[in-house]
Image (cartoon, rainbow, N blue to C red):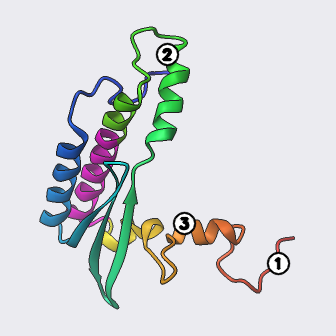
Amino acid sequence: MANLKNYTSMANPLKTAAEIEAILIINGAKSIQKDCFGGKVIALRFLVDTAIGEIPIALPVNVEAVQKILSAQKKRNSNVKATAEQAERTAWKCLKDWVEAQMALIQIGMVSMDQIFLPYVINRGGKTLYDTVREHGYLLDKGVERT
């Protein structure tokens, strides 16, 4: 297995988060805010205009998951740094790369902003659509039973 993308990144996570914000703004996102915990940015929240009005989006970054991957890869490659700091840098750079790729698809007309971020749409209870659907066994209709 290849090493995780951006596993050697030295970019400051706050700077990378700001770069993501700029990319989102250029592509029509509004009211961007940062969710912070323990002195770290853990998610970006923003609004996107759609045919039915503004929808809220939460884009989290999962540093713990990245650190687990780096720790596993360190067993095969002693050059891999598996620190929390490296995991944070790597996670934010991977998120930036993903956002940039999604914006390219929007720019060529393949998809819309709300389509790309659909799993991250936040409901009235503060949960993302992905989390809500996952809790219901990936069924969108509560009346349908799994066979």
Q: Choose the circle earlier in sequence order: 2 or 3.
A: 2
Is residue 7 or residue 141 the one in the foreground?
A: 7
| C-alpha separation, residue under disc 3 versus residue under disc 1 | 19 Å
Amino acid type for the residue under numbered disc 2: Lys
| C-alpha separation, residue under disc 2 versus residue under disc 3 | 31 Å
Tell me if residue 56 is in the magenta stretch.
Answer: no
Q: Which mark is residue 130?
A: 3
| Whether residue 113 is situated above or below residue 143 in the rendered picture | above
Residue topped by disc 2: 74
Residue topped by disc 1: 145
Amino acid type for the residue under numbered disc 3: Tyr
| C-alpha separation, residue under disc 1 versus residue under disc 2 | 44 Å
| Whether residue 143 is situated above or below residue 7 in the rendered picture | below
Expressed as whole percent of the image width and height from the top left, the position of residue 47 reads 28, 76
Q: Look at discs 2 and 3 and give the one toward the viewer.
A: 2
Q: Secondary structure at mark 3?
A: helix
Crowd class of label 1 (few under 14; some 14 to 19; many from 20; radius 10 Å)? few
Magenta segment boundaries in residue numbering: 92-110
Instruction: Point out the residue furthest to the front here.
Output: 38
Expressed as whole percent of the image width and height from the top left, the position of residue 48 reads 28, 76
Instruction: Point out the residue furthest to the top here.
Output: 78
Name the residue rendered at 27%, 28% in the picture: 9
Q: Look at discs 3 and 1 and give the one toward the viewer.
A: 3
Name the residue rendered at 34%, 31% in the picture: 85
Q: Secondary structure at mark 2?
A: helix
Tell me if residue 105 is in the magenta stretch.
Answer: yes
Q: Secondary structure at mark 1?
A: loop
Instruction: Point out the residue furthest to the right here.
Output: 147
Amino acid type for the residue under numbered disc 1: Glu
Residue 132 is drawn in which quadrant?
Answer: bottom right
Is residue 134 or residue 71 the one in the foreground?
A: 71
